[in-house]
Amino acid sequence: MALSSIAISPRKLRHDLYSYQEDSNTPLVISVLASLIERTMARNERIARNSNWSLSRDSRVRVFDCRESPDLTVQSYLERIFRYTRAGPPVYVVAYVYIDRFCQNHPEFKISARNVHRLLITTIMVASKYVEDMNYRNSYFGRVGGLTTHELNKLEVEFLFLMGFKLHVNVSVFESYCCHLEREVSVGGGYQIEKALRCAQEIKSRQKQDGRYNYQITHVLL
């Protein structure tokens, strides 16, 4: 869905990110994230058509490739994940951080229609475990994302090792990505994401309680 087709504003995005209520409608961050990813996919496919390299040549990251591209848009897939998991907006921001880190650490990986759905469900599930106090099991996330429990467990383990288990997102990083999403809504709009807000405070509180943020591998399997 194009961003211009829905009523949006940086102020609305900011409200969703930090004052979201569980009974609210689909948060704006989903549409913004979908727009960013779909534009990245289109650019990657255009480059692939005009060059000799193929998408996801590195065998290590081809774990996210599926045999056939699902007949579901990124927007619809994210909405489905939200509908059945009710993961809060900060989860999608952290998932966006993970996707960006993953792509930077593995430049051979290019987001495409063949890998985007598996990448999204994996990063959102991992981000949910990082941000939320309570989470669904991998088996439930798998059903939501259209994967078996075994498939999702494997994707999660592979993703963690490919990331080097570097999953910590501090307050400044979180805020910088929020600002990037905000600029996506209205470039040069002059809006700024407020700093002393709930999600940032929660992350900062965790940082004080425990200086180490090593992801526990025991959380991966049921």
Image: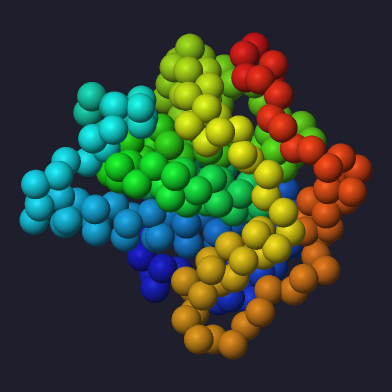
Say left or right for 2 vs 43. right
Quarter location, residue 29: bottom right
Say left or right for 197 vs 168. right
Q: Is residue 76 visible?
A: no
Query: Is 47 rendered above or below residue 81?
Result: below
Front one among 154 and 107: 107
Instruction: Give the image location of residue 206, x and y in percent.
Output: 84, 45
Query: Is 219 rendered above or below residue 61?
Result: above
Query: Is 39 rendered above or below residue 81?
Result: below
Say left or right for 205 vs 2. right
The tally of labels here is 0
In the picture, the quarter occupied by the N terminus is bottom left
Front one among 202 and 76: 202
Instruction: Give the image location of residue 130, x and y in percent.
Output: 70, 38
Q: Which residue is drawn at 38% across and 54% down?
A: 37
Q: Is residue 170 visible?
A: yes
Q: Residue at x 24, y 53 (%)?
A: 44
Instruction: Give the image location of residue 67, x and y in percent.
Output: 23, 24
In the picture, the quarter occupied by the C terminus is top right
Q: Which residue is drawn at 42% across and 25% down?
A: 146
Give the colour scheme of this rendering: rainbow
Query: Is 50 rendered above or below residue 119?
Result: below
Instruction: Give the image location of residue 148, x and y in percent.
Output: 45, 15
Q: Residue at x 47, y 81 (%)?
A: 187
Quarter location, residue 16: bottom right
